[in-house]
Image: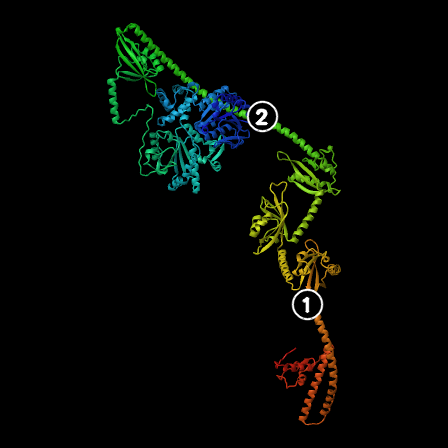
Amino acid sequence: MSNEFLVVAIGASAGGLQALEEFFSTIATDSRGSGAAYCVVQHLSPDFKSLMPKILGRHTNLTIEVAEDGMPIAAGHLYLNRADHHIVIEEGVFRFRPKERGVRFPIDLFLTSAAATFGDRVVATLLSGSGSDGSRGIAAVKAAGGQILVQDPESADFDGMPNAAIATGIVDGIGTPQELAHRLLATLRGDRGAADATAPRGASWPPRWFDAFDQILRLLHRHSGIDFGSYKAATLVRRVDRVLGLHQISLPDYLDLLHREPSLRDALLRDLLIGVTSFFRDSEVFGALDREIVPALLGARRPGDPLRLWVAGCATGEEAYSYAILLTEAFYRRGETPDFKILATDVDAAAIQVASAGVYSEASLRGLSSGERDRFFRSSPDGLQIRKELRERIVFSVHNLLTDPPFVRVDLVSMRNILIYLRPDAQRDALSSAAQALRPGGALVLGTSCNIGELADAFEAHDSRLRIYRRRADTMLRRGRVAPRHPFRPPDRDRPSGLRAVDELSRALLETYLPPLIVVDDELHVQYIHGDVSHLVEPPQGPLSTDLRLMARGAIGGALAPLLRQVRERGLPATIEGVPLADDDVVDITLKPLRSDQPRFAVELTWRRRDPERGETSTFSASELGRVVDLERRLVRKQEELQGFVEELETVNEELQATNEELIASNEELQSTNEELQATNEALFTVNAELERSNHDLIALSDDISNLLNTSDIATLFLDRELRIRRSTPALRELFTLESTDVGRPIAELESALDEPRERLVVLAGGVLQSHERHEDRVRDRSGRRYLRRIHPFVTETGEIDGVVLTFVDITGISAMEAELERHDLQAAAAFDLLQGVFYEIDPAEGRLRTRGDVASLFPGARAGEGIDLGELRARIFPDDRERAESLFDPAIAGVAPATVDFRITSADGGHRHIRGRGRVVQHADEARPWVTGVLLDVSEWVETQEELSQSRARLDMLIRNLPNGFVSVLDEHLVFREVYDSRLDELGLPPAEFRGRTLEAIYSPEHAAWIRGHLQLALDEDRIVSFENRFGSKTYLMSVMPLSAGADGVRQLLMLATDISAQRAAHQALLEAKNAAERANATRRAFLASMSHELRTPLAGMVGLLDLLDDQEMSEPTRAHLRQLGTLVAAQGRLIADLLDISRIDAEQLQLRYRRFPLAELLALLDFDAYLWPPSFPESERQFVDEPIHWAEVVDGVLYVSNGHRTYARSSRG
């Protein structure tokens, strides 16, 4: 039961508060009232807070809640609408809809959505209110099978809404709020209420109820032409039974009511013609049609042939329009112009009228997407209307599927809304019509609860689950006709011969065994005569009449009228015996009701003689009987005349009714005019309220402007079209000699403190008046203060120029700041140029880097001022560096504190560049999202230098660590060891790790440390390399101290190289001692050589003199040759002695060489072997040598007489 609770949708407006209190006070008297969910929708003002929850809380024990978006609806709750949104129901929960301008029907909107969601479980209840809101919504509820209850206009404070609802003719119940509540409680209890609590229902009807039911169907058949005999009896009985429960009436009484009230017949027709439909109902079926059926039909059609569809039982048109939308989009997907025709039919003329209009509420379009709404619908005053281009492709018409001929050459037939309500034989005929209408291969779409039954041979299943079939091409069908269920059958004129024989036999049997009788209607007019009654009935004299009372003989006519009344009242046959005819003849009259579509009666007249034994005596004499008959005939005549008067009166009454209807139409027009006047009145009231509000706003605005002008520091001057003073601010007196009495004075007459001619201001203001464009410049006064002057056109609300407005803003400080900023900008630009970098900031909305500086040098191809696309920049960053670089560009990663990131980018030549970025997040006060700002520097050269330096440091470190004899240390300017390299320090008793951070005094003795400190301080002071030897223990070190530049901390340093020269020092000492010994030996040798050369030179001189004497003597040639040889030997000996003297001179570093140019012949003469020149033509100019010839001769001899010496002949040219 919790899933099948009723939803009571209550609409109320003006005067509805009291009605709601009465309604819910009555509901509270029965616990069953909490078995439903109640939704109250009112016309609420958004300007005032509703007190409805508190007010209704005093009259109900239901849980009261104000509807929220997404809130599920449940039984036992009372939901109230909000003032700021419309509410609807979708899939069992409330949904908000915005209040759009022009949409003033929240009750219609809610009722339509409730009907679409809950169907026949909705009870729409309309209470007091003005206007017509709700009258459209109850139509949707009725179509869904729900109930409609309306407050009696007599009990409503405002009867506009109740009357509009009642005028629709679909209302199920009318009463006071208490009566409506009782009806609802009766529905919740499951009975019809107190009026007929024991009345039978459905299958338990007595036979006379079924007779009345048949008469109702015939009455509707005559009223509308629709034969409900083809519909399922159970469905009709169930619908009629529900109507009986709503009206709290028995079926025979309801039949009488239908005879009296034609409007109730229309209401019953709407109840029986179930028109439940919606756009794209059962989306799975339409999806299959879109994917499979429609493309196949489009592909199979011949060029130029439009696609034809027949939608039988289209109701209010939603399904037909759904097919039209489906086909239109299918054509567009194929790139074709839509070419199709849809035949939409229904037996309900009212539904066809709604479908033809094509106007639907927003709630009924839930099956459509927003795109489909925009493409196929347009806004109208009553809702959303199908666009003309789609409407023109559908033909709506009234058509009876069972009695009217089918259409032909149809490609698709849809019967999704009708077969379920028809009897099996009617379903068979309907399917036969569809088969005759379809082309071979055409598609048939049925409802999910239907099947093709006996026509399986005519169709093949395309999708049996979705009830989609295709027409077979090899089947011939014959369409039959469905017989009505009720006894009434119109006569068939062209009967077969066999049936005519049966009729003749029946007539013979009747004439043989049935006594004479006369069939009359409910006014005793003869309809049919059986047998010979001429002795009882004769035509009257005068005008022809079929009134049996005038035709009957004797007192028969007078007895018929009371007998007819008795039969009418009881519904059973009645008899009067012994009615006098003439003399002793009497007639027994029996009147029986006949089963017919119209009231008919059989009059049996049995003639006999009066029986005295039965006490039958003659009541009248012959004359008296004649007089009675005459009086009765006169009475009948008078009755006929009276009937004529009645008919005339009925005619007059009909005319009066027509006039009344015209008056009603006029009244409706007047009411519409009244509503328009009321709307105008409301608009005027609103306008008046707005004007009051505007006046209040203008006063407040005037006060604001006055205070603004009086407190503003901006000098402002208002001038009219003649450039006369209109208004000014107090700050203007600093520039102009202006008083309050100067209003209306020309601006040209005012003295100003501006450093410009007075006429310039007049010219500028006049130019703005002519051009209608703002002017802006900078001026200064005579004291040197600077002002920003703006001259604006004074624009009125109508857009006219009615003067100018001048403002003077003191920008003296701003100008100074601008100059300072300009200087800083120049400095920053110069700095960025020197640093080869750019300043950047990233706007998250743009995704680009806004840059300043030489961006082209950093990113070749980029232009200054255009910025850099962030995506392109990320693409150029090396993949290994992208994640690290994101902290410079992404606000979600970057921090408030600056972060420095190095990354690489691909350069234009295919290489790479090293970029160093430093950025941070900046949150602007007027920005919702943070920015990132920072600098980007090209550090490629620095990185290369650092790499080279690192390599140099690595090589130096390797060199230092591999020094064979010594160690290296680094000291700061305070002569404290910072770093020491070499494990040999262990010999000092201090490992390198403990050596760091110590002073000289911690290692050496004070005297030794002071001596070393002096050398180190000398290197620092004179910034040069200082070397000294340092003795430490048994070793001697050569200390080389070199000053270094300051480090990152600004402290100068010293590099001290200590080389172990103990071995070199020992070798040097040994060498020195060997040198001293050699020098002593050389001195002894020199002395010896000097003495020896002197001793040898003396006898050699004598030999030379003797040879000279002998050369002067005459002698033989052989002797002279021997003499020459002797002279050569003596000369050689002399040269040898000279060489010994040269050696001594060399040792004493006293040898001096004498250089001279000599010919080659002179050298050859000194050689002790034969030598000559070759070739003989050797130029004389090239036969020259430098040095002493004897030295060259010694060289030549030395070369020739070494063990591996050989002779070499050479020619050289010195030019």
Residue 997 in sight in this render? yes
Q: Left or right: 609 with respect to 379? A: left
Q: Amino acid at mark 2?
A: Phe
Q: Quadrant of the C terminus?
A: bottom right
Counting other residues with Cα less than 10 Å from the Cα at mark 2, is it few (<14), some (14-19), or many (20 or more)?
few
Above/below status of 128 relative to 72: above
Location of residue 789 in the rendering, given as x and y in whole percent from the top left corner: 69, 41
Q: Which residue is mark 2?
A: 685
Residue 996 point in image, percent of width and height: 68, 56
Q: Residue at x 69, y 66 (%)?
A: 1062
Snapshot quadrant of residue 212: top left
Query: Is 635 placed left or right of 890 in the picture?
Result: left
Quadrant holding the N terminus: top left
- Label count reads 2
Residue type (three-letter) at the residue carrying disc 1? Ala
Measure the alpha-carbon separation of dots 2 and 1. Answer: 121 Å
Answer above or below: position of 1202 versus 217.
Answer: below
Q: Residues within 10 Å of mark 1 (few under 14, many from 20)?
A: few
Mark 2 or mark 1: whose residue is earlier in sequence: 2
**Mark 2 element type:** helix
Report the residue marked by disc 1: 1063
Report if residue 102 is visible in the image: no
Q: Nearer the viewer, residue 208 or 531?
A: 208
SS at badge 1 = helix
Residue sitting nearer the eye, 720 or 983? 983
Tell me the quarter of the picture where residue 488 sits.
top left
Q: Is residue 1087 left or right of residue 458?
A: right
Whole-percent x, y for residue 30 in the image: 48, 21
- Image coordinates of residue 306 in percent, x first then y, are 39, 38
Instruction: Give the colour scheme of this rendering.
Output: rainbow
Above/below status of 1174 relative to 548 = below
